[in-house]
Image: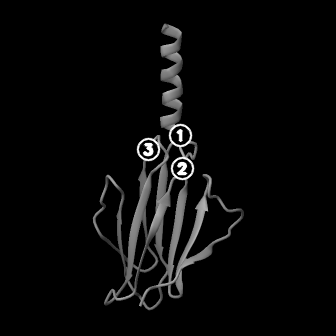
């Protein structure tokens, strides 16, 4: 019984220590436009951040062991913040998905994504347009 308890503790620690996630949102907008970033999950709501041109927002977090962690974000372009887009900024696909960095780039013609590691990883330096701005 003692050996089983030790084994379960070690397995639990290994699962927890490798389960992570992160979101990076970079402002690559032209004409010195600022970017408003507002993100939330089921359990967390981050305060709205204003990202200067050329800067980026990064959020690191632990994912849950059930594989259901999701973060939603809304981006708005300054100066009047009329152009916006809401989307799933991070999605854990299963309990075996050990997390990833979801790298988002806000550009004039849309919002781009590259996922590093995890189940959604895409090879090389492939960054693709994921969303258009809503006007």
Residue 58, above or below 134: above
At x 47%, y 42%, the residue is: 66
At x 48%, y 8%, the residue is: 2
**Is the Cβ of the residue at disc 1 closer than 8 Å to that at disc 3?**
no
Q: Mark 2: which secondary structure?
A: loop
At x 34%, y 55%, the residue is: 42
Mark 3 highlights which residue? 64
Residue 17, above or below 21: above
Residue 115, above or below 12: below
Query: Real-space Cα distance between discs 3 and 2?
Result: 10 Å
**Is the Cβ of the residue at disc 3 closer than 8 Å to that at disc 2?**
no
Q: Position of residue 90 (x, y in %)?
A: 48, 60
Mark 1 highlights which residue? 18
Res 39 quadrant in image:
bottom left
Asked whether, in this view, residue 102 is left or right of residue 119, the answer is: left
Q: Position of residue 132 (x, y in %)?
A: 51, 83
Disc 3 or disc 2, which is closer to the eye?
A: 3
Mark 2 highlights which residue? 99
* Crowdedness near tag 2: few (<14), some (14–19) or many (≥20) residues, C-alpha within 10 Å: many
């Amino acid at each position: 019984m003692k050996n089983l308890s030790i084994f379960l503790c070690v397995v639990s620690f290994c699962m927890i220590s490798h389960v992570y996630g992160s979101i990076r949102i970079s402002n690559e907008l032209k004409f010195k436009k600022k970017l408003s970033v507002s993100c939330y999950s089921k359990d967390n709501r981050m305060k709205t951040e204003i990202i200067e041109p050329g800067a980026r927002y990064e959020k690191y977090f632990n994912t849950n062991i059930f594989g259901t962690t999701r973060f939603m974000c809304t981006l708005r372009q300054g100066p009047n913040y009329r152009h916006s887009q809401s989307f799933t900024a991070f999605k854990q696909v299963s309990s075996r998905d050990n997390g990833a960095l979801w790298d988002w780039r806000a550009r004039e013609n849309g919002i781009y994504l590259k996922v590093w590691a995890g189940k959604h990883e895409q090879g090389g330096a492939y960054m693709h347009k994921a969303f258009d701005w809503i006007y």
